[in-house]
Amino acid sequence: MAYPQHNMPNLNGWSLLEKTDIEKRSSFKFHFSNEKAAFPASLLLNKERMLSYMETVGDKIGSKEKRVIASMFFKRYVFCILTSSLYALSMLNKQFDIRLENVVIIEEEDSEKEHSWLPSFSLQNSDGMPMAGNRENWRSSVFETLFAKNISVMLDYLAASTKASKAMLWENALIYIAWLYNTWKGENHPSEIHERLIDDYQFLMEQAQGFHFGTASNPFIELAARYEDHQFQQRKTCCLYYRTYGGTCCNTCPLKKAD
């Protein structure tokens, strides 16, 4: 039978089963057609290119407000980045090279749905690297690469270029992290993986230091309690989705009045 071979590592460090699972769970693509509109994420670290891209995104989501567009772009960006990288870390004890300069953004064409926009992404080098040495030290390094060398870099430049609130952008990332780990913890996994999920999430929310994020302090500590165990409370900041075409206030929006 061919199926047992699906879980055997191939030359770039991932089994076929792992590749399939990662692509199914996230907007990550190990391979993409040359016909797709794709570009290195690092190109956005130029104000002129960033603002031009924001205009393009704004047309797709139905907004002309830079801070609104910045929030919607960042939500999609971190969803793509976090889902694949955290799944690899906590489920598989592996890592991608997730530095920002390795990221490729893929624009998906969807002419049938007006104001619909959900990009996917890939990596110039998508090799899978297994855990090396002490797991706590390895995890610390993975988180530092993920946040300080990717998410925080994009967040800072996006905020500087569009005047979007950094607090809002960090909470956009936090809500996805909490949702991912709460979802995974609710799935049927071996006890070893379940314990790893709990430990990794707690480390990120409670123990990670500012250097992991490229910031003065952990941006999640004060907000983490709002997102525990699926009991998502009201966000502290509004993500501004309601200011897009057809957008509404999210269930956790702070602008919603209490019943």
Image: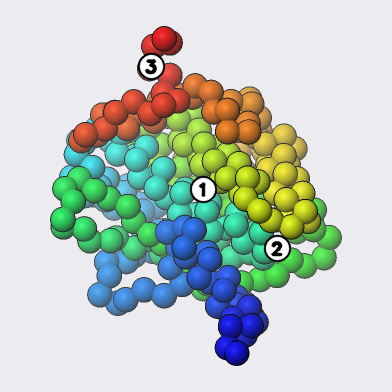
- Measured from the top left, where is residue 115 in percent x and y? 20, 45
| Residue occupying the far right of the picture | 134
Q: Is residue 9 above or below residue 177?
A: below
Residue tagged by mark 3? Answer: 256
Residue tagged by mark 1? Answer: 151
Left or right: where does residue 193 sit relative to residue 147?
Answer: right
Any mark on residue 93, and which?
Answer: 2
Return the residue nearer the eye: 45 or 235: 235
**On-image quarter of the N terminus:** bottom right
Q: Secondary structure at mark 1?
A: helix
Query: Is tag 2's residue or tag 3's residue first in the polypeptide sequence?
Result: 2
Q: Secondary structure at mark 2?
A: loop
- Number of marks present in the image shown: 3
Res. 17 visible in picture: yes
Q: Amino acid at mark 3?
A: Lys
Residue at the spot 29% in from the left edge and 60% down from the top edge: 107
Return the residue nearer the eye: 202 or 149: 202
Q: CA distance from mark 3 to mark 1?
A: 29 Å
Say which quarter of the image contains residue 131: bottom right
Q: CA distance from mark 2 to mark 3?
A: 40 Å
Task: Check disc 2: other Cα within 10 Å, few if <14, some if 14-19, many if 20+.
Answer: some
- Measured from the top left, where is residue 109 in percent x and y? 22, 61
For marks 3 and 1, give the one nearer the viewer: 3
Query: Is tag 3's residue or tag 1's residue first in the polypeptide sequence?
Result: 1
Q: CA distance from mark 2 to mark 1?
A: 21 Å
Q: Is residue 82 above or below residue 14?
A: above
